[in-house]
Amino acid sequence: MAAPQMQVSSSTSPSTPRLSPRKAVPSPSIGWELLGWVGLAFFVIGALDLAMGWIPARFGNPEWEFGTVSRTFDNLPITALGLTMLLASAAARGIDWALRATGLLALLLALFLFVGLVVYALDIPLAFRAVGASEARSGLKRAVLKALVQGMLYPIVLAAIGIKGIRLTLPPRPRLS
């Protein structure tokens, strides 16, 4: 005779609630809104960090100008990312005033950076004269190259972003057929 066997059912009993996986409902509008808030935080934090580097201003002091402009270019990514996230959020949600505001901010930042690049470029000969023929000269060359590349690219990209943001708020131009 066979030993008694216990059967275990794989189904749940009626008293045990069955958990089913819940699917998230897509919500692009909430996603774009959250991106805008994070972009605003990035922009404000980055802009404050940039502003603190310029205070107290010591224009006319080449060492301060050179170091401050270099620091500005190095700390710019968070500010530029935040501004771009704000603009993308405003574009996706169709908020005209925010598109104009972020577009204008991008253009003003591009202009500010261009002026900073000019000041930086004027200080380069002084920096090389101060270093002379020492070992620090190669490090200075790398720093200058990096700052010049950043100083040219950031204003171009920010100007393009600013123009695009402002253009999105303008009425479409009639097409010639």
Image (tube, grey):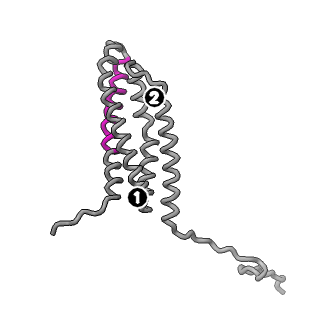
**Is residue 153 one of those drawn in magenta?**
yes
- For label 2, the crowd category at 10 Å Cα-Cα, with few meaning under 14, some 14 to 19 and many 20 or more, is some
Q: Is residue 68 above or below residue 82?
A: above
Q: Residue at x 65, y 74 (%)?
A: 20
Tell me the residue that label 2 is attached to.
54
Q: Where does the N terminus fall, quadrant-wise? A: bottom right
Q: Secondary structure at mark 2?
A: loop
Image coordinates for residue 133, horizontal then vertical, percent: 32, 13
Q: Is residue 92 above or below residue 100?
A: below
- Residue type highlighted by circle 2: Trp
- For label 1, the crowd category at 10 Å Cα-Cα, with few meaning under 14, some 14 to 19 and many 20 or more, is some
* Disc 2 to disc 1, C-alpha distance: 32 Å
- Residue type highlighted by circle 1: Asp
Does residue 175 appear to the left or right of 96 in the view shown? left
Q: Residue at x 39, y 23 (%)?
A: 65
Report if the CB atoms under discs 2 and 1 are less than 8 Å apart: no
Which is the main secondary structure of the residues drawn in magenta? Answer: helix
Q: Residue at x 33, y 26 (%)?
A: 119
**Is residue 45 one of those drawn in magenta?**
no
Q: State the residue in front, 61 or 131.
A: 61
Tell me the residue that label 1 is attached to.
96
Bounds of the magenta segment: 136-158
Q: State the residue in front, 144 or 110.
A: 110
